[in-house]
Amino acid sequence: MTASRAALLYAVGLPLLYALIPTVTFPGPPLDVVEGFAWGRELQFGYTKHPPMQAWLLEAIYRLTGGHYFGGYWLSALSVALGYLFIWKICRHLGMSAWQGFWSIVLTSVTFYFTLPLPEFNPNILQIPVWTGMILLFLRVLETGRLADWLLLGVLTAFGLYTKYFVFLLVGTIGLYILVFGDVRRVLLTPGPWVCAIVCLILLVPHASWLLDTDFLTLQYAASRSKPASSIIGHLWNPLNFLLAQIGNHAGIFLVMIAGLGWRGLKDFRSARDRHVLDAPARKDRFLLWFAFVPLGVVLLASAVTGSEFEHMWGTPMFVLSGIAAARFTGIPALWQHPRRALAAALAIQLIFLSVIFGQAVLEPYWKQKQTRIHYPASAVAEEMARIWHEDQNTDLAYVAGDMWSAANVALHAPNRPSMFYLHSRTLSPWIDIDDVQKKGLMIVWRGDRKTPLREFLKYYPGAVRQGSRTFGYLSGAEIPEVTVNWLIIPPGKVAEAPVN
């Protein structure tokens, strides 16, 4: 089999399995997917936690599949498959062999971010094709200077920033690369970079306008997720903790390399490597090293200076070049003593993670015997809430308020897809037309045995208690404790005029 055919089979077949297993076995989608569906229904230029692209794509796939939620798993698969395609092309542009391209995909695929998190389609997963695509386009414009590629880079950059602001890290890495190296700096004298920037800025105008209208709501959330250090120790521990987590996420690469090299290969590795890594152009090595390690260095420096604790999963797109760097700078696959063992190790790692995903859906409830999100009886709850509303008000449920999990599941699964009035806050739900809510009424839902709603609602409805409650069994044959869902109907004309903070 040729390297290109092997790469195609691996890059298509593996994401297919990561989409197929949750499609068949998951009774319900994970939190980020439920959240995205609830937001996507509103088709806004931004949402409480993130820019809108993830939610837009989920809404599109929801409509394309006739109202099914499994499309989120396939969006993750598509994101990863595109990432593998771009990794292959980056390898070829860097002058690496076809088999190095294949092994770059394999080694990338065994990093943690390309495995267990995939069923939860979110902005981190969506950044995989964004980062690989932007790096590929930047590499191409440095080679050819084609204006069309600069224009595409501008479009993809805007797409990335509509996905997650973390893409600014890659934009800054590209900008620094241009400024630091004199042989690259001359591109500033061509129209390409300026066309790229102008196209990107024009495409970002609607989102920028939304940010101004909402007092930079999404940026406020992003800032809230960064946990500042409480002492000087945090300035040391937080970046170290992030670095150690990222090393741990690369454990699969180390295992595959050990399997491929074998004991004798490990003993002779350094001298043999030197014979196989000196033949590439220095500029291409410089490019690879820069984009493989500078983003990590910036994050570690920012964490050390500010003391902020960065979420480990934010590292998802930062390491899309890890497999390429491993293949290039360790002389793989030329140094493989046991290439079949290496491939077997990679496939074994994938089998383990795929089995874990299968186990989460089928086996985990039996040994944990506790409530899990993917087994939550969302459809039954949503249909019952809609029925109760219709029985009480003789109209369709149009608005549902509550915490994210309770309200978003009703918004996703109830007939006619009511709008989610997240925590009854017009600040957190800027798409809400309070006059229309006043006209159509509102249902508040929450889980648990407490009779009163969450405190966020009590400030609008002092003394409010639940109007009713139901218990629902989880979607598993295991003895999972039932969930109690409470509701409170706020009829038309009685909705509190929640201010915009």
Image (tube, rainbow, N blue to C red):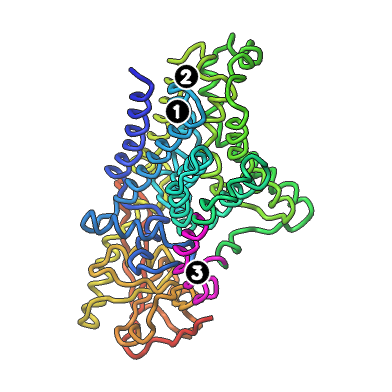
Please indicate whether residue 22 sits to the left or right of residue 126 in the image: left
At 35% from the left edge and 63% from the top edge, which residue is drawn? 40
Query: Residue 89's spot in the image, x, y percent?
Result: 43, 34
Crowd band around label 1 with a 10 angstrom C-alpha radius: few (<14), some (14–19), many (20+) = many
SS of the residue at dot 2? helix
Image quarter (top left, top right, bottom left or bottom right) of the C terminus: bottom right
The residue carrying mark 3 is: 208
The residue carrying mark 1 is: 106
Q: Label 3 sits on what residue type?
A: Ala
Q: Is there a contact, CB below 8 Å, between mark 1 and mark 2?
A: yes
Range of residues picked out in magenta: 196-219
Q: Is there a contact, CB below 8 Å, between mark 3 and mark 1?
A: no
Query: Residue 8's spot in the image, x, y percent?
Result: 34, 29
Q: Vertically, is 184 above or below 408?
A: above
Which label number is shown at residue 342? 2
Crowd band around label 3 with a 10 angstrom C-alpha radius: few (<14), some (14–19), many (20+) = some
Image quarter (top left, top right, bottom left or bottom right) of the N terminus: top left
The image quarter containing residue 297 is top right
Q: Vertically, is 370 above or below 438?
A: above
SS of the residue at dot 1? helix
* Foreground residue among 80 and 191: 191
Q: Which residue is at the far top?
A: 264
Q: Was residue 213 drawn as part of the magenta stretch in this picture?
A: yes
Q: Earlier in the sequence, mark 3 or mark 1?
A: 1
The image quarter containing residue 31 is bottom left
Which label number is shown at residue 270? none
